[in-house]
């Protein structure tokens, strides 16, 4: 199932609704890479609240999205990782290094706004 | 009465349960008769052996009376249930006062000894009869000693289990000190189970309180090995995946040395010297600024 991507001011919000196949993840990556340029987005939020598993492929893809969007001028925040999922991830050594994370959508938006303000402030 | 029993040939007595029961009954009546003096003798021996030092002489005497009567009742009926219940009840009362297992066992063995001695004295002129009396007495006495000791140990273990539960529940509180700021004070050794519980509690606390910064204070942790250190690093990373920052405070010199010596990678951990520093850093991260009232008033009036 493809992931719907919404635009909210300068941000894109990808809200994952159900478990994703590897293909869906690749699709999400490609869509976001394209849409960041198309909408001139400054931030991307990927909401994984609905996921109860994040395997190594998913983690790697999320990290790839974060690095990629950065190259295209937008910061990515992963929001809504569940406590159990987080615990399983660190045990597998999947720690999403250098990727921003936040508790939920609201926190993610606040974090992006703060990062933007810092960047423009300088 | 003992004179009469000697008439029966020993072999017949030993093979005849009826006679063993009769002997036991006789024994019971003897113990009932000399209740006062034997009880006093027992209490005296307890004090002499410096057992049950946590209890007063009166208390010892009162308990001794009940145990004595229970003891005789068990010899009479052969049923240890009442004694079991009493032993449990007694243990419940004396364990909190620091009475040790060996004391309880010692006391019961003393009573066994006191009673056996009284039997020796009574039957000293007839060795065969004494033997048969002891044959009847010993198994019952052993069973009683066993029951009391097991009851005591079981009660002790029950208390230990109960306390372990309580400690486990208390061991890792996650407290909110300010909006979005949590503290997690850890006291005592961290074992793998506790480390897991700690991670779970912290992550749950972050979710429930919408925590953004958590200060984990390990001032009260005496030592840490590499497995536990790695668990802590994992906890910090898991919290970060939820979008929260963890600040670790209060690493003792010993722990710091251990971690450096065993080469645990702590580059992902924010560490601050003490809890106060940790909370101050957390407040800065969250955008709080704490100003003493007088300073603020002075600033406003100028």
Image: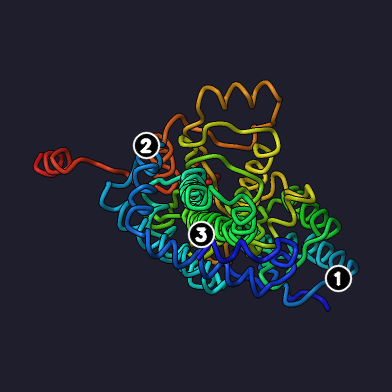
Q: Nearer the viewer, mark 3 or mark 1?
A: 3
Which percent across, then down, holds residue A22? Answer: 89, 66
Which percent across, then down, holds residue B31? Answer: 43, 61
Q: Nearer the viewer, residue B93 or A49?
A: B93
**Numbered circle sitting on residue A24:** 1
* Res B224 → quadrant: top right
User: Residue at label 2?
Assistant: B48
Q: Nearer the viewer, mark 3 or mark 2?
A: 2
In-image side of A30 versus B91 (left or right): right
Could one spot residue A42 in this view of the protein? no
Kindly indicate whether the residues beneath marks 1 and 2 are on one polypeptide chain: no
Which of the chains bears the disc numbered 1?
Answer: A
Mark 2: give few (<14), some (14-19) or many (20+) Cα within 10 Å: few
Which percent across, then down, holds residue B288? Answer: 35, 47
- Residue plotted at (79% across, 51% down): A92
Could you tell me how far apart the alpha carbons at marks 3 and 2 are, in whole angstroms? Answer: 27 Å
Residue farthest right in this picture: A23
Which of the chains bears the disc numbered 2?
Answer: B
Kindly indicate whether the residues beneath marks 3 and 1 are on one polypeptide chain: no
Q: Nearer the viewer, mark 1 or mark 2?
A: 2
Dot 2: element: helix
* Res A33 → quadrant: bottom right
Could you tell me how far apart the alpha carbons at marks 1 and 2 are, in whole angstroms? Answer: 84 Å
């Amino acid at each position: 199932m493809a992931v719907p991507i919404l635009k909210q001011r300068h941000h894109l919000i990808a809200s994952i609704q159900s478990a994703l196949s590897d293909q869906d993840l690749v699709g999400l990556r490609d869509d976001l890479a394209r849409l960041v340029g198309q909408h001139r987005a400054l931030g991307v939020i990927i909401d994984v609240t609905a996921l109860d598993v994040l395997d190594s492929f998913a983690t790697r893809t999320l990290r790839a999205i974060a690095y990629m969007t950065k190259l295209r001028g937008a910061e990515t925040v992963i929001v809504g990782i569940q406590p159990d999922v987080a615990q399983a991830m660190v045990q597998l050594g999947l720690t999403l290094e250098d990727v921003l994370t936040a508790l939920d959508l609201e926190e993610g938006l606040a974090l992006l706004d703060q990062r933007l303000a810092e960047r423009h402030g300088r | 009465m003992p004179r009469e029993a000697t008439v029966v040939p020993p072999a017949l007595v030993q093979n005849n349960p009826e006679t063993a029961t009769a002997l036991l009954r006789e024994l019971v009546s003897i113990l009932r008769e000399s209740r006062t003096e034997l009880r006093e003798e027992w209490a005296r021996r307890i004090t002499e052996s410096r057992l049950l030092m946590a209890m007063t002489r009166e208390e010892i005497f009162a308990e001794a009376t009940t145990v004595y009567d229970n003891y005789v009742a068990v010899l009479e009926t052969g049923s240890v249930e009442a004694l079991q219940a009493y032993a449990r009840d007694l243990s419940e009362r004396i364990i909190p006062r620091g009475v040790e297992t060996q004391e309880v066992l010692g006391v019961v063995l003393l009573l066994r000894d006191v009673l056996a001695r009284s039997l020796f004295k009574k039957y000293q002129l007839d060795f065969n009869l004494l033997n048969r009396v002891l044959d009847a007495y010993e198994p019952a006495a052993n069973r009683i000693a066993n029951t009391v000791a097991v009851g005591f140990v079981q009660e002790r273990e029950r208390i230990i289990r109960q306390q372990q539960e309580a400690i486990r529940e208390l061991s890792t509180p996650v407290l909110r000190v300010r909006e979005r700021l949590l503290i997690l004070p850890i006291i005592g050794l961290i074992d793998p189970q506790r480390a897991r519980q700690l991670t779970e509690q912290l992550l749950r606390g972050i979710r429930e309180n919408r925590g953004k910064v958590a200060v984990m204070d390990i001032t009260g942790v005496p030592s840490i090995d590499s497995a536990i250190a790695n668990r802590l690093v994992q906890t910090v990373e898991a919290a970060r995946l939820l979008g929260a920052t963890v600040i670790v405070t209060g690493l003792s010199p010993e722990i710091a040395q251990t971690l450096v010596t065993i080469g645990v990678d702590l580059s992902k951990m924010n560490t601050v010297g003490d809890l106060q520093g940790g909370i101050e850093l957390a407040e800065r991260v969250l955008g709080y600024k704490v100003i003493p009232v007088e300073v603020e008033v002075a600033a406003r009036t100028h």
